[in-house]
Amino acid sequence: MSPGRPTTIALDCMGGDHGPSEAVAAAAQLSIERPDFHLILVGDAVVIGPLLDELEYEPGRLSLRHTDEWVSMDESPAKAIAAKPNASVLVACQLVSDGRADAVVTSGNTGAAILAAARKMGRIPGVRRAALAAVTPTEKTHGPNDDPFALLLDVGATLSASGRDLVTFAIMGAAYAQAISGNPSPTVALLSNGTEAHKGPREVVEAHEMLANLSEVNFAGNVEGLDIPRGSVDVVVTNGFLGNVVLKMLEGIGEVISELANDAYARKFLWRFGLTMLSSGLRQIQQALDWEQYGGAPILGFVQPIIKAHGRSKARAIGNACKVAVKAARADMGREIERAVSRVPAPEEEGAHAT
Amino acid sequence: MSWRHIYRWDLDKTYLETDFESLRRLVLIAFEKPEEKTNVPGSASLLRELGRDHEDRDPSRVCIVSGSPRQMRRTLEKKLELDGVRWHEFHLKPQWENLRRGRFRAVREQVGYKLPLLLRSRLKTEDGGGVGETLFGDDAEVDAFIYSLYADVLAGRVTTDGLVRVLRAVGAYDDAVDKAAATAEKLDDDDCVERIFIMLDRRTPPGFFRPFGPRVVPIYNYFQAALVLFSGGHLTPEGVVSVTRSFLDAEGHSADDLANFFQDVVRRGHLPATAMQDLGLAVQELSGVPNEAEVIWKSVQKFSDLGASRRFLPPSPPPGGDYEALLAHLRSRHA
């Protein structure tokens, strides 16, 4: 962070399913509520300006950075980033790289966000692949703050990961849980189809072997899918393909439970009565499953923080993502991960299982 | 005597930080001593600078029109004296008379009080013809509406009949309507109101004032007003420095905050393309402001950040000029 400057978030306003209106609403609200940080709204100022003008905001805490290019959700990330040098996500990462902002928040195209971060902010030495880390609600609480969620990574940045990549993900996830949740020694596990060390695909078995010999990580072995909602460990490591499937399934279950409850409430008086009796408990479940409160997933592996908010994010979720970004910037997340990664000896056959 | 310019100011929430949201606060205000009253940051400095005499230039005229009761005259005048502000007219509301005559509507209603008074003031200003005006109000009541209507009556864009219709719609008493109409008849058409500054005390979204046209400039602080006034030739660079310094003394903003305030007023179209050059000229004198080089550099950055989206909206009246529609718009906010 630059000394003498308030913590500043570069907010890519052009991504996401809802367009710039939700990002602008989040920024306006934060500018009033949070005097401790500033926001730079990156995007088409011709669109963003009038949206902002219709809201209550504190002008001293936010500014605009105009660009008329952006990457839409359905574009090919590599092609779009190559063709649009002034894409909003690239400009946001450039602001961080130039020292004008401390972290990036985007709800846009995940692939484009990763490429933009790699191009403008650079990877942490020793990290070959980035990982998207999401929090998932759990039965058991975690860390000194009794957080009701665990960290799951990767949930979509790197579709297939080598054993070495999974080890790096484990180190990054643990460093993140230490810095953000204040958990001094988070337990880390690999997601597999059995708890035994030899279970799972080759890269999981390899990662298991490496992590078991690594004193820097509090490795708890393998966990199965059912251990994720139970919260058996603080950090669950997997590749981006499986992680994304798991995350979306958990979100889907939450939404289906909520819809079923609403449906039951409408159908029969007796069910309505029962649900009313259970309403306080159901509300707690609903709150735990509410992804908007968790604020977005950090893309780990870059020198400076970049937080990816859900594509469906509305103002509340984007606001929470900005708060996570501020926390990550203030905790000097990138440097913490760099320190953790540097303590791990480089493997003899570096790159052998790169995908 | 000829005048350079006329500056008309409201007091509560425009010049003074006045909290009359509760009855308790209202009572406390009545008993506040002059030295206990707090300025909106930068207001005293700005009003002093606008009223300052300059060699080889005609003096400017300061007219204060406040909705505070006449019983507060001594306290308020003393406060202005303490602030080193000079004024030529000071009007307060005859609240006691309103109560005594049973005109309860007039106690709260502002259009029927301020508009006839402003028109009379313009009529009575000797050698006032052709002299430009800049008006200062806030978003707590209906200042943007009163000032815009005043400006368009002077300019001849609102006819006497139109004025009467609007005054009746706001519930003004017949004698106030008659006085306003009679005065308006006597005034020559004069498109003299340059800008109307509205202090966003209640943080009303600035877009709410778009129907009033770009002549109305919603501002978050007097630093923003000083920049616009400097670009219009109303303030010297030293004047901008003085306002900025008193604003900073009161609120302690960082260089980033100032650069953001600057970008905000540029973005909303109230500063011309030469704003950066103007600011450069002004801040050359910023020797007393902390981190002046940082303020300049960051403002330059924020100015360029707007890129092709930058635009300037020259001051102009409400598009369409339908004051009955504007009244409905205003009431939607205050309802």
Image (cartoon, rainbow, N blue to C red):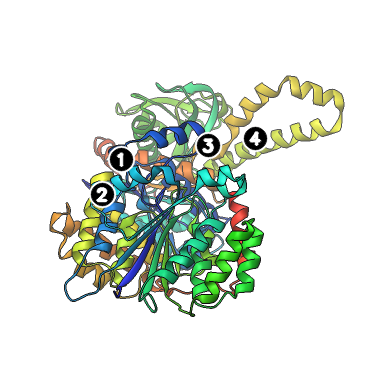
In this rendering, would A217 be left or right of B291?
right
Please, what secondary structure does the residue beneath circle 2 have? helix
SS of the residue under disc 1 = helix
Disc 3 target residue: A293
Q: Which of the two residues, A313 or B4, is positioned nearer the viewer here? A: B4
Closer to the eye: label 3 or 2: 2
Q: Of tags 3 and 4, which is closer to the observer? A: 3
Count residues near mark 4 (Cα–Cα under 10 Å), then give few for <14, some for 14-19, many for 20+. some
The chain letter for the residue carrying disc 3 is A
Q: Are marks 4 and 1 in contact (CB under 8 Å)?
A: no
* Amino acid beneath label 3: Gln
Mark 3 or 4, nearer chain start: 4
Give the answer, above or below, for where B321 lies relative to A52. below
Residue at mark 4 shares a chain with residue at mark 1:
no
Label 4 sits on what residue type? Gly
Residue underneath mark 2: B81
Percent position of residue B148, x then y:
51, 66
| Residue B331 figure quarter | bottom right
Q: Secondary structure at mark 3?
A: helix
Q: Are marks 4 and 2 on the same chain?
A: no
Label pair 1/2, CB-CB below 8 angstroms: yes
Q: Is residue A248 left or right of residue B47?
A: right
Residue A282: x and y in percent read: 67, 25
Disc ID at residue A254:
4
Disc 2 packing (10 Å; few <14; some 14–19; many ≥20): few
Residue labelled with disc 1: B34
Q: Nearer the viewer, mark 4 or mark 1?
A: 1
